[in-house]
Amino acid sequence: MTSPWTNEAAIGRWNTGTTVEAMEATADDGDFAKRHLVNPDLLRLLGDVRGRRVLDAGCGNGYFSRMLAERGALVTGVEPTDRMVAFARGKEAELRQGVTYVQADLTRLPDLGDPFDAVVCSMVLMSIPDWKPAMRACVEALRPGGRFVFALVHPAFEHLLETWREHGHHRRHRYLTEYEIPGPTAPDFHRPLSAYLNELASLGCRIRELAEPALAPAAAAEATPTTPGIDAYVHLPNFLLVSADAPA
């Protein structure tokens, strides 16, 4: 894919498009999708994090870093945008959980100390134009055999809610090619699932599990009055999570 976007331009767009109000609204456990679909499997795939060094790669406002710290992890969060890292550091000053927030581009990580037991990269890779160096940096930050868990918008079911509302089922007309997906804050970039898994394999990682979480029918019924079409998430996966082990 030839794209006019650079990593620096994407970071700039996320920085200018992010509001304090939006970060405050998701500061505890993320938005509806994170709470019901992404977070539970992220935590399950990471396993017991007590006393473990965990890197939250692309931590945004730091909500998941704080969730990990509550569970006893020794957390470093890396975030490139000025506004989000400032917000995360403000929360740390308030809560004093021992989370270290570092401002850096994932493709150019500074020295973060000893290798990590686990790296989590949630809803980040599909937002990075030049994403392969970021995945490589995540794997290289791990100790031998360490756990790498990442989450994406499922490449086969992007725009699931919108197409379900319009048609009553999911539709897509292309999948194999890479292309830009305009977003309200900044674009995402569609890549087939094979692109991510093949890159993971090229880095010597061993896949442990793929997860495609479904929304509980009760949660869908409760949300339907304010979010028509949310029952799509009961039937089709809007998110994909991958757990892998770094080379031993």
Image (cartoon, rainbow, N blue to C red):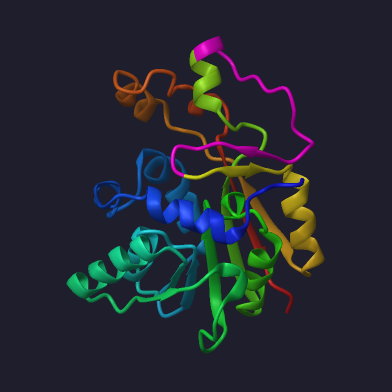
The picture places residue 164, in percent across and down from the top left corner, at 53, 18
Which residue in the rendered view is the most extreme toward the front? 4
Which residue in the rendered view is the most extreme toward the bottom? 113
Count of numbered circles in the view:
0
Residue plotted at (53% across, 40% down): 213
Q: Quadrant of the C terminus?
A: bottom right
Please state if 146 lies on the left or on the right of 224 as rendered. Answer: right
Check the image and report above or below for 35 versus 72: above
Residue 198 in the magenta stretch? The answer is no
The picture places residue 190, in percent across and down from the top left corner, at 67, 41
Q: Quadrant of the N terminus?
A: top right
Q: What type of secondary structure mainly makes up the magenta span?
A: loop
The picture places residue 36, in percent across and down from the top left corner, at 40, 41
Please state if 69 lies on the left or on the right of 210 as rendered. Answer: left
Nearer to us in this view, 107 or 98: 107
Residue plotted at (34% across, 59% down): 63
In this view of the protein, can residue 44 be seen by the observer? no
The picture places residue 72, in percent across and down from the top left corner, at 35, 74
Nearer to us in this view, 59 or 224: 59
Residue 172 in the magenta stretch? The answer is yes
Instruction: Quadrant for residue 216, please give it.
Output: top left
Nearer to us in this view, 109 or 210: 109
Check the image and report above or below for 140 versus 84: below
Check the image and report above or below for 242 versus 248: above
Please state if 67 lies on the left or on the right of 195 as rendered. Answer: left
Q: What are the residue bounds of the magenta stretch?
A: 166-185
Residue plotted at (63% across, 57% down): 6
Instruction: Quadrant for residue 62, please give it.
Output: bottom left
Which residue in the rendered view is the most extreme toward the left? 94
In this view of the protein, can residue 117 be seen by the observer? yes
Please state if 22 lies on the left or on the right of 236 as rendered. Answer: left
